[in-house]
Every structure is written in structure tokens, then in C-alpha cells.
Image: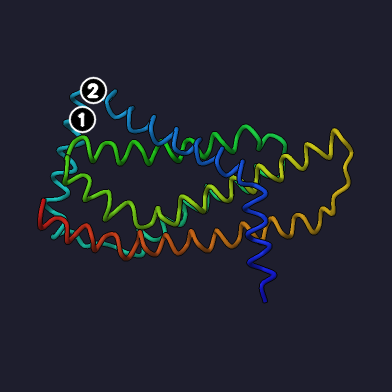
Amino acid sequence: MNYFPRVIFDYFKKNMGLYIFVFLIFVGGTILGSIAVNMMSDNQMKATLDFINSFFVNVKNIEVNFSTIFYVSISNNLKTALTLCILGLTIVGLPLIPAVIFFRGFVLGFTVGFFIGSLGVKGILFSILSILPQNIIIIPSIISIGVAGMTLSLTVLKNRFKHYTEDYPRLLMGYFLFNFTFCVMLILAGLIEGYISPVFIRLLTNYI
């Protein structure tokens, strides 16, 4: 009964160092992304802000296609997950997986940084209600898939140079099952982004 939870706990404990490393990479990307907002020219900032304000003004009159938002969300997230999963099968995954994680952090940091920098308190509320809910699931999932990929890459590297023997079929089965679990979580995040966050945005426009 307690076998599966114990295996999961042992896995996280064993790879805690990698989790911290990948998390810091993500945080670094987020910080740099938020700083990059300040590098936008005044014209770029004004044009983007005018677009956002126009969106808020007209959002009540816009027919929201929830299924399209859901599809775009899971498409983007599953593409990232698939990229990380494939990279984990090779040695090149060791440098490239952190790069992908860093980029995801950069995009998130830039987005949140722009809203907060241009809208102030309203931007904070917008970020909390429309960006945070799905990312509570997306961020741990992407980081976990990245850690799994780096762990497998390290195993491949170790076996190549030190000639260790591993039960690769069993190892790969666990790897794909682990990633599949988090891909399901990403689909759940897509449901939140597609069907719940837009409702929050509509409610928020009453106060912006």
C-alpha cells in the first residue's frame, strides 16, 4: 500500500540537489525576464500598453473561445515537455535542458514583470488571477520533467565512460511513466488556463 509513495519520496530525496539546481535556473530566468522589461523602448512599451488597455476595455464584448485557449496552452506546454523528454535520452540534454528551463522562466518573468511594471497593483492582481493558477501546476511539472531528463542524461554519461550496467528497459519505462504523469498534470493546467483563467480576467476588468 505504501510502496508507491515511498518510491516517489525516495526519488525526490535522491534528486533533491538537481531539483534545487533546476529550480534556481528557472528563478534566474524569471528574474532576468523581469529585468528585460526595462530594456524595452518607450515606443514599444507604449504600443504594448495601449494594446493591453484596449483589450481590457473590449474584453466584455469579445467572444472567448475557451477550447482554443485550452488547445494552445496544452500544445505549448506539451511541446516543452516533449523537448525535455527527448533531450533527456541523450548526453546533450545536460546543457540544453537547463537552457529550456531558463527560457520558460524568462518568458514568465517578462510577462509578469511587464504587467506589474505597467499596471502596478492592477498588474499584480492580473498576474495572480490569470497567470498564477495554471503555473502552480506548470512550473513544478516542467521542473520535474527537466530533472528526470538530466538524471537520465547523467546515467547515460556514467554508463558510457565508466561502463556501468543498467537495466535500460526498466529505466526507460520508469522515465516515460514519470513524464507521462506530469504531462497529465500539464493537461490539467491547460484546463485551468482555458476555462478558469479567462473567467477571472472578465471579473477583473470590472475593477481595471
Q: Name the residue nearer the viewer: 154 or 36.
A: 154
Q: Quadrant of residue 163?
A: top right
Left or right: residue 130 compared with residue 46: right
Q: Position of residue 33 (x, y in %)?
A: 37, 32
Query: Tag 1, which secondary structure?
Result: helix
Above or below, comparing residue 129 to residue 121 in the picture: below
Identify the mark at residue 206; answer none if there is no mark. none
Rendered residue at 17%/40% (across/down): 120
Mark 2 residue type: Ser
Left or right: residue 33 compared with residue 203: right
Above or below, comparing residue 77 to residue 91 in the picture: below
Q: Name the residue nearer the viewer: 173 or 155.
A: 155
At label 1, counting other C-alpha atoms closer than 10 Å, the crowd grade (few under 14, some 14-19, many 20 or more) is some
Left or right: residue 90 compared with residue 188: right
Identify the mark at residue 41; answer none if there is no mark. 2
Above or below, comparing residue 140 to residue 63 in the picture: above
The quadrant the N terminus occupies is: bottom right
Rendered residue at 44%/37% (across/down): 27
Query: Tag 2, which secondary structure?
Result: loop
At label 2, counting other C-alpha atoms closer than 10 Å, the crowd grade (few under 14, some 14-19, many 20 or more) is few
Q: Position of residue 154 (x, y in %)?
A: 73, 39
Tell me whether circle 1 and circle 2 mark residues in contact (CB < 8 Å): yes
Q: Position of residue 166 (x, y in %)?
A: 85, 50
Q: Position of residue 117 (x, y in %)?
A: 21, 35
Q: Quadrant of residue 203?
A: bottom left
Mark 1 residue type: Met
What separation in Å lies between label 1 and label 2 (alpha carbons)?
Answer: 6 Å
**Which residue matches tag 1?**
45
Q: Name the residue nearer the viewer: 34 or 56.
A: 34
Q: How is the image coloured?
A: rainbow
